[in-house]
Image (tube, rainbow, N blue to C red):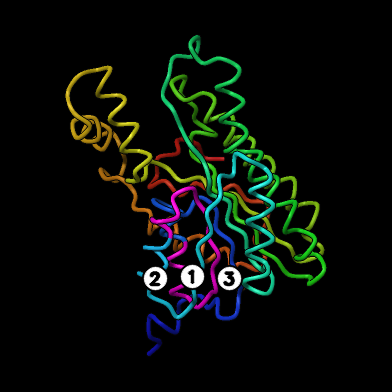
Amino acid sequence: MTSETSRAPSLSGRRVLVTGASRGIGAAVVTAMSANGAAVACCARDIDALRDLAARAPGPGKVQPFQADLSKFDQVDRFVEEAREALGGVDVLVTNAGQVSLRNFLETDEEDWAQTIRLNLLSAVRTVRRVVPTMLDQQWGRIIMVASSGAKYPEAAWIDYAASKAGVVTTAVALAREYAARNVLVNAVLPGVIDTPMWEGSAQAIAAVQGGTAADVKSAVQSTLPMKRFGRPEEIAEFIVFLASDRASYLSGAAIDVDGALASHVF
């Protein structure tokens, strides 16, 4: 009988970069990559949270934290260079850094848009540009760009966020076609409603406007979901681990909903 461990994707020896890793999906990705044997370099603005994450990682892969504000492009460059030096190279990149703010469209000015797009989209683009040459040289690479179901099903209350994540999806699909022949595979993952600190913040913002509590908001949202529950960051992370592994060797250019049947389309 095959054990669960032997069926798990092995990332032993792989060198992985994860952005936006201090909490939520990013932290879960770091933990899952480490558990599957990868050496991980991760970044976020909150270095204390990253150090705690690294200390708690189950191994066997080592986790190395780096402080970086990816809305500042020089810090993107610094993170990639320091991470590449620390790991001895890069095999896998997971772009997860992002933010969302709930606000009225007419009160969201161009600077708000610029800040959201700079962090959510352009930081991912710059990070990818810094790692692709290495992947092309070694004829092996995996790039997983974390987007959102909001890229397909936007709401006016977070329109700039949705637009930035739609840009992430189109970037991933375009790059997949460009680099597929050189074994650099690129996919976008579109999480649905996931129980993360980011969603908790959104629930608090909604409650402040509508009344009640964040728990009330989450309960109301949960009742509308097909599975009647929020997704867990670990569920997204395990799928990302699969995409990073050799088991996904013919999967590239996909924009994959991981949303508990939330998507309402057939094709």
Tag 3, which secondary structure?
A: loop
For label 2, count other residues whose C-alpha is less than 10 Å away and answer few (under 14), some (14-19) or many (20+).
many
What percent of the width, then of the height, locates residue 42? 53, 60
Q: Is residue 94 above or below residue 198?
A: below
Q: Give the side of residue 91 with respect to residue 25, left or right.
A: right
Q: Residues within 10 Å of mark 1 (few under 14, many from 20)?
A: many
Residue at 77 percent across and 65 percent down: it is 134
What numbered label is drawn on residue 57? 2
Which quadrant would residue 143 be assigned to in this image? bottom right
Image position, residue 259 (x, y; %) = 42, 46
Query: Residue flagged by tag 1: what amino acid is it?
Result: Val
Residue bounds of the magenta highlight: 30-50
Foreground: disc 1 or disc 3: 1
Q: Is residue 35 magenta?
A: yes
- Residue located 29% across and 31% down the image: 203
Q: Position of residue 194 (x, y in %)?
A: 36, 45
Q: Residue at the spot x=60%, y=67% of the render?
A: 248
Give the residue displayed 47% in from the left and 19% down from the top: 156
Q: Amino acid at mark 2?
A: Ala
Reply yes or no: does residue 104 show up in magenta.
no
First along the sequence among labels 2 and 1: 2
Of marks 2 and 3, which one's residue comes earlier in the chain?
Answer: 2
**Vertical comparison of 149 with 17: above or below:** above
Label 2's element?
loop
Residue beneath label 1, please? 63
Residue 69, placed above or below residue 91: above
- Would you name the residue on which mark 3 appears? 245
Amino acid type indicated by mark 3: Ser
CB contact under 8 Å: marks 2 and 1:
yes
Give the Cα separation between the discs numbered 1 and 3.
18 Å
Find the distance from the CA under tag 2 to the CA under tag 3: 19 Å
